[in-house]
């Protein structure tokens, strides 16, 4: 049935994609690629809560959604996908009706990967008629329901599939942050106290003089 990935890195605009390997599992390739993109974002955002949600998404959510696609005898055929398929990267010859696609960042993946962009309201492809017709040609991968779940963000996915892990991780993060703040406040208080004592000593010396 072939493998997922590609023989060279491909680029989504200026960003290289982590798809330059060959994997039997779609879950493995997708996790590698998503984790790579997350790692690019972390130093820019510097947002601890984002780091927590990224970790849980990769450890809990992605396997929960994607592993069933290739379990219990189910077969997922790798497809050469566009990689950034939206209406701005498609066109049609007005004379012949021939369709064109461009600005590709292709690799062999799950065919439904390309439909992710279609739900963005700014795209004309967000019209549900496109998805309905797509499904007529390419039925939803079994077991169906988990494969087509799409939510607004990773936090919602974590709340759906690993709520207790998310609560524990965020609580631990809050406690660590609170501990750091308490330590900073204690240090600042000690400095202020020390500064006050020095000022009192200076005043006493001036009185003696």
Image: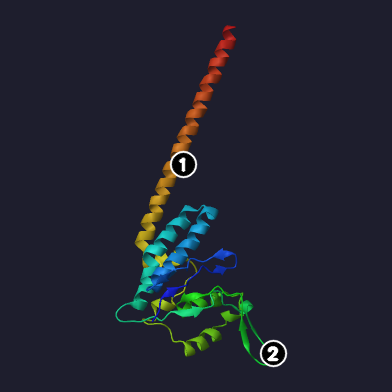
Q: How many marks?
A: 2
Q: How is the image coloured?
A: rainbow
Image position, residue 198 (x, y; %): 53, 20
Observer-nearest of 54 and 183: 54
Label 2 residue SS: loop
Label 1 residue SS: helix
Image position, residue 208 (x, y; %): 57, 7
Q: Which residue is located at x 41 percent, y 76 percent?
A: 3
Mark 2 or 1, nearer chain start: 2
Q: Disc 2 designates what residue?
A: 94
Image position, residue 67 (x, y; %): 35, 73
Q: Which residue is located at x 41 percent, y 51 percent?
A: 173
Q: Which residue is located at x 39 percent, y 76 percent?
A: 146
Q: Looking at the image, is mark 2 or mark 1 nearer the viewer?
A: 2
Image position, residue 4 (x, y; %): 43, 74
Position of 189 compared to 166: left or right? right
Check the image and report above or below for 184 versus 142: above
Observer-nearest of 32 and 155: 32
Position of 148 compared to 131: left or right? left
Furthest-top residue in this view: 209
Q: What mark, if any, has residue 138 been given in the picture?
A: none
Furthest-left residue in this view: 72
Q: Which residue is located at x 67 percent, y 93 percent?
A: 96
Q: What mark, if any, has residue 181 been given in the picture?
A: 1
Marks 2 and 1, Cα distance to the nearest angstrom? 63 Å
Observer-nearest of 43 and 160: 43
Furthest-bottom residue in this view: 96
Observer-nearest of 21 and 155: 21
> Which quadrant is the N terminus positioned in?
bottom left
- Pointer 1 local density, CA inside 10 Å: few below 14, some 14–19, many at least 20: few
In which quadrant of the rendered view does residue 77 lie?
Answer: bottom left
């Amino acid at each position: 049935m072939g493998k997922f990935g590609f023989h060279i890195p491909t680029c989504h605009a200026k960003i290289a994609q982590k798809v330059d390997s060959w994997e039997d599992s779609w879950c493995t390739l997708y996790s590698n690629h998503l984790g790579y993109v997350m790692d690019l974002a972390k130093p820019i955002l510097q947002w601890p809560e984002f780091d927590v949600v990224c970790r849980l998404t990769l450890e809990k959510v992605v396997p929960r959604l994607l592993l069933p696609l290739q379990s219990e005898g189910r077969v997922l055929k790798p497809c050469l996908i566009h990689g950034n398929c939206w209406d701005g990267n498609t066109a049609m010859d007005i004379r012949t009706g021939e369709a064109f696609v461009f600005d590709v960042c292709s690799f062999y993946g799950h065919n439904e990967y390309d439909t992710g962009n279609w739900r963005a309201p700014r795209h004309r492809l967000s019209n549900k008629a496109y998805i309905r017709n797509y499904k007529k040609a390419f039925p939803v991968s079994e077991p169906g329901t988990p494969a087509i779940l799409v939510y607004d963000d990773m936090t919602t996915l974590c709340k759906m599939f690993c709520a207790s892990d998310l609560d524990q991780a965020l609580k631990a993060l809050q406690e660590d942050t609170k501990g750091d703040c308490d330590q900073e406040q204690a240090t600042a208080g000690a400095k202020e106290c020390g500064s006050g004592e020095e000022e009192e000593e200076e005043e006493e010396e001036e009185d003696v003089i």
